[in-house]
Image (spheres, rainbow, N blue to C red):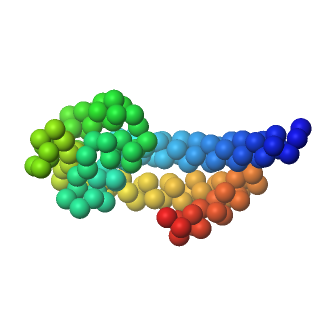
Amino acid sequence: MGIKDDAVEVRAQGWRTLAALHGLIETELERALQAESKLSVVEYTVLDALSRQDGWHMRMQQLARASALSPSATTRLVNRLEDRGLLTRILCADDRRGIYTELTSSGLRLLEGARPVHDATLERALGEAQGIPELAPLVDALPRLHSTV
């Protein structure tokens, strides 16, 4: 194996470690959010992203980026959340082709109830990951990543 191959393997191992940490966290979050709030992780992510916007709304393409979903998957998700009364769609005043997705007061209430469950579960999952030697360095790096964003 040459130097170039070694560099590829190091990056691949880093990616596998990141995927393992993500999988551990997402599994725990999914279980807790479903049990307590009947929300999936991606539904929580969308409600959370909307709650952090001025006016509680975003264009669909922004929401797709925030939730790491394709445009069609975002539309299906928005349809489900809209059917539950957690968000609504409104036409953009300055561009009639644009559609905003907006958090409803019911959506905000559900999110506020789910947030403590999310945060406690995340903390617990990160603590568990901290005890796994392969994942501990990545968990340790998380606070440094936040300060650079």
Q: Nearer the viewer, residue 149 or 105?
A: 149
Task: Tell whether 118 sits left or right of 105.
Answer: right
Query: Foreground residue, 74 or 22?
Result: 74
Whole-percent x, y for residue 9 in the image: 78, 42
97, above or below 143, in the image: above
Left or right: 117, with 91 as reference point: right
The answer to whether residue 124 is above or below residue 76 is below
Q: How many marks?
A: 0
- Residue 95 appears at what percent x and percent y? 14, 45
Do we see residue 24 in this rendering? Answer: no
Residue at image position (51%, 55%) is 122
Look at 68% across and 42% down and name the residue there: 16
Judging depth in this view, the residue of 117 and 40 nearest the camera is: 40
Quadrant holding the N terminus: top right
Q: Is residue 63 left or right of residue 99?
A: right
For the point 23% across and 56% down, the residue is 56
Quarter assignment of residue 131: bottom right
Residue at 82 percent of width and 40 percent of height: 5
| Residue 4 on image: x %, y % | 81, 43
Let me know if residue 132 appears in the view: yes
Q: Residue furthest right?
A: 1
Q: Which residue of the protein is positioned furthest toward the bottom in this rendering?
A: 147
Does residue 6 appear left or right of residue 33 in this picture? Answer: right
Give percent across and percent down for residue 103.
22, 50
